[in-house]
Image (spheres, grey):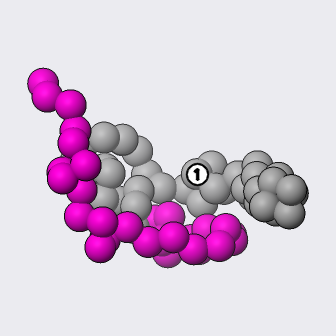
């Protein structure tokens, strides 16, 4: 297996945005996509897949680091 090289990436497809709550429809889409490739199994459950406490703490920490 070969290592990835910078030319392996289409930089035009990379999008950056401010952290915010994960919309359920986006999380469900990502889950379904990964499941379609056999990367994960089981049904999507918003209360299991999105931990709002961890999400909030990560966003708060990111804000502190940015303000740095």
Q: Is residue 10 above or below residue 3?
A: below
Label 1 neighbourhood size at 10 Å, few (<14), some (14-19), many (20+)? few
Q: Residue drawn 78% across and 61% down? A: 66
Instruction: Quickly name the residue at label 1.
Output: 49
Picture quarter with the N terminus = top left
Q: Does 41 sit left or right of 38 as displayed?
A: right
Residue 8: within the magenta? yes
Picture quarter with the C terminus = bottom right
Which range of residues does the magenta coloring cover? 1-28
Inspect this view and state whether residue 44 appears: yes
Location of residue 44 in the rendering, given as x and y in whole percent from the top left corner: 48, 56
Q: Does 3 sit left or right of 45 as displayed?
A: left
Location of residue 18 in the rendering, given as x and y in whole percent from the top left corner: 65, 73
Locate residue 22: give its quadrant: bottom right
Location of residue 10 in the rendering, given as x and y in whole percent from the top left corner: 23, 64
Q: Main secondary structure of the magenta part?
A: loop
Q: Judging from the image, what secondary structure is the residue with disc 1 in? A: helix
Between residues 12 and 25, which one lies in front from this camera angle? Answer: 12
Inspect this view and state whether residue 60 appears: no
Q: Residue drawn 62% across and 49% down? A: 48
């Amino acid at each position: 297996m070969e290592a990835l090289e910078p030319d392996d990436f289409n930089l035009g497809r990379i999008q950056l945005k401010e952290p915010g709550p994960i919309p359920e429809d986006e999380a469900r889409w990502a889950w379904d996509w990964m499941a379609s490739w056999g990367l994960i199994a089981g049904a999507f459950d918003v209360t299991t897949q999105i931990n709002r406490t961890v999400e909030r703490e990560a966003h708060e920490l990111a804000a502190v680091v940015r303000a740095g």
